[in-house]
Amino acid sequence: MTQAQLSAQHLSADWASQMRPQESLTAKAWRRFRKHKLALAGLVVLTVLILACILVPWITRYDPLKTNVDLIREPPSLAHIFGTDELGRDLFVRLCHGGRVSILIGVATMLVSIFLGTTIGAIAGFYGRRVDNVLMRFTDFVLSIPQLFLLLLFAQLLRTTNNPTLSGGPLPIIVIIGLLSWPGAARLVRGQFLSIKAKEFVEAARMSGCTNGRIMLRHILPNAISPIVVAATLRVGQAIITESTLSFLGFGVQPPTPTWGNMLKNAQAQMTYAPWTAIFPGLAIVVTVLALNYIGDGLRDALDPHHVE
């Protein structure tokens, strides 16, 4: 092949690449995410779980709170696919109903912790110096306190109030876990802001007269969003485990409202002769957290700007 033919071939290839529509960042991230088979499977499993938690309590004829002494500790069957508990309540319906509460707590807790962590980390990383020193020492102080101890202490204090919303509902659990789980996100965001604020486009925005708030929100934060999204996904699974631990110890959402944690607590005394009452809530927690972790891994690969395809 002659030099002229080679040059024409290269020019044709360059022209074709220029004419080909450019792939958007969202489409590129989705394509990378789909290559992560475990993450894709986790997304499917999590979607099925959420749909079951939303739809099953509405379409079933069983009441998750109504007891039936004729059906106490029935093993799994066609009528009750997960069996019944110690009060004759359908375990599958209670599992789906409890999943609403557990997943709601996980998502709401994530929003609280990510908001606080992003705010504190962004301010510390952007302003630096004395502001950074004060905020990071406070972050280190929060990290040094045993989280479970404070969770139990605050939960016990709220249980002594006369307000039923504060003493036994999910709201105090969301607030407590969210207020104690932000330091990790704060450190992550601080590191991202410290790295990005030295870039040329940030200096250009500053020279053009942009305010500090606009620079943080419009220029730095969008470029730091990828690790924040990954951290938020993993935070949901951690919050579900924390809520389950509190409920298992008797300091979480109080019966008769079901959650996966207090269902495990109720099952611990009957595991020898009714093991299904513990197996299915435990599996629900494990499967949900694994799915979220795999989704987080997939998002980390999909949103990584240095990812090599």
Image: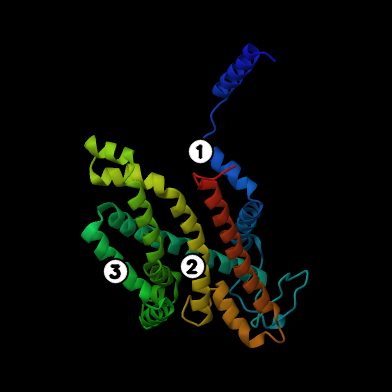
Say which of 142 and 288 sits in front.
Answer: 142
At a point 25% along the width and 53% down the height, the residue shown is 127
Instruction: Check disc 3 and report its element: helix, strand or loop.
Output: helix
Residue 167 at x, y = what percent? 40, 78
Residue 87 at x, y = what percent? 64, 82
N-term mark: 2 or 1: 1
Asked if one can make out residue 101 in the rendered structure from this viewpoint, the answer is no
N-term mark: 3 or 2: 3
Q: Type of residue at label 3?
A: Phe
The residue to which callout 3 is attached is 138
Residue 8 falls in image quadrant: top right
Say which of 303 and 254 sits in front.
Answer: 303
The residue to which callout 1 is attached is 25
Q: CA distance from mark 2 to mark 1?
A: 30 Å
Q: Give the answer, above or below, for where 123 lies relative to 260.
A: above
Instruction: Check disc 1 and report its element: helix, strand or loop.
Output: helix
At a point 38% along the width and 52% down the height, the residue shown is 192
N-term mark: 1 or 3: 1
The residue to which callout 2 is attached is 239
* Front label number (3 vs 2): 3
Q: CA distance from mark 3 to mark 2?
A: 22 Å
Neighbor class of circle 1 (other Cα within 10 Å; few <14, some 14-19, many 20+) is: few
Q: Type of residue at label 2?
A: Ala
Neighbor class of circle 3 (other Cα within 10 Å; few <14, some 14-19, many 20+) is: few
Neighbor class of circle 2 (other Cα within 10 Å; few <14, some 14-19, many 20+) is: many
